[in-house]
Amino acid sequence: MQDILTSTAGVKETSPDFRGEGKARRERLRILFLSHRLPYPPLSGGAIKRWKVAVYLAGNYDLSVAVLSAPEDLPHREAFLRLVNPVHFSATLIHRPRNALNLFRSWLRGLPLAVYRNDSPVFRAEVEKASRSADVLYLDSLLVLPALPEAFRGKIVLHAHNAEYVIWKRYAAREKNPLRRAAVLLEAGRMRRYEALACRRADRILAAPNDQVFLRRLGVNPAKWVDTSHLGDETLLDLPDIAFRGTEPALLHVGSLDWEPNLDGLVWFLREVWDGLKERHPQLRFYILGRGGGRRLREAARGRPGVLMPGFVPDLEPYHRRCRLFVAPVRFGGGMKVKIINAMYRGIPVLTTPVGAEGLEVMDRRHLSISSDAAKMLRDADHLLKDAGAWERMRDASRRHARERFDWGGVYGSLRSAIER
């Protein structure tokens, strides 16, 4: 693994149009934003939240940014700098794959694997230097905690995208191989201890209410918690309703196909639901969009006509208008599922599970179809594919619910409270 550091200090002092009015930049709180990924482009759930927060912080505070960067981030750095215009920017390139050797090394270091894969001495040194002129450190996730300088005496705000240890526990419950299950449970325990450490180090913790249920069990001071939501692209609400008659008998999934909860759910859906649904609707297609996929998903799709994997698609609107149902069959995971919120924003009826519906405050068969049972999911999908009235009622109810509940204004208010309170 090689670390390559690039820095841009003193990036333009002028403010682009989206910046908020008020005090001059030199009079604002100085915030150092730390992330394990470049906050651009906003193509997935975590990336959308990261991007929207970075833009808000740049518009209201004196923002510096230090990120760990994957090779695929390189083409997007200039666009990020142009749009966000931070006072200081640094990116440390890191590539430490998820494999048995790095798992062993993580045990030697006493770190969860995900944290070890994002630990860089170059990044730590850059953060220590940049933190000397910061009032607030904003940790975009616990993965950047190893870079937190011991000597920093300002405010530390932690953004908990998920209750990470719960994801690992739920993963273990699904694992049939006893050796793998034992290894996953061990990782869940290590993540739980590390997550507790991250919460203790932070002065304020931004987390969705459904994740707080689990994170509060770590024994963290209740005064630290600040409610937040993980939302999607609210501009989808400005687009006109999709008409049932304008869609095709087609299913859609959008997400990172190398993220285990997505991969597991899709393989389960193909094996347990798709075949029966295809028998009832011979013309049915299933578009699975996103980077990755790997051998397991391709093996599950092989021999199943109508299952298509176009890969990454930059413009989703043609698929939104074409596909009659959105499928998110996640069986474990955490946080609010941004891909589901985006489908609700756009008015596409969604098939999902109780895990997928966590934190959304929705009703089954009104806002979404919710089931962990393959037979019920098949019946609901069959009904929504055929019944225009039921489809339109779910479209309208889910879109109305998303408009009323999933508003970025509340997220920004919570963020401001965490920083300034």
Image (tube, rainbow, N blue to C red):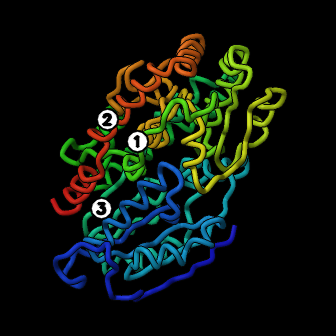
Looking at the rendered image, the quarter that the C terminus falls into is: bottom left
- State how many labels appear: 3
Drawn side of residue 411 relative to residue 329, left or right: left
Image quadrant assignment for residue 304: top right
Q: Amino acid at mark 1?
A: Tyr
Q: Earlier in the sequence, mark 2 or mark 1?
A: 1
Residue sitting nearer the eye, 393 or 19: 393
**Residue that label 3 marks:** 156
Q: Amino acid at mark 3?
A: Ile
User: Which residue appears at 42% of the width and 66% of the height?
Assistant: 34
How crowded pointer 3 is (Cα within 10 Å; few <14, some 14-19, many 20+) is rated as many
Q: Amino acid at mark 2?
A: Arg
User: Which residue appears at 72% of the width and 46% of the height?
Assistant: 310
Q: Secondary structure at mark 3?
A: strand
Coordinates of residue 187 in the picture (x, y in percent): 56, 38
Q: Are marks 3 and 1 in contact (CB under 8 Å)?
A: no
**Residue that label 1 marks:** 345
Please, is residue 183 above or below residue 150 in the view?
above
Mark whose residue sits in front, 3 or 1: 1
The answer, for residue 335, to whether it is visible in the render is: no
Label number found at residue 400? 2
Q: Secondary structure at mark 2?
A: helix
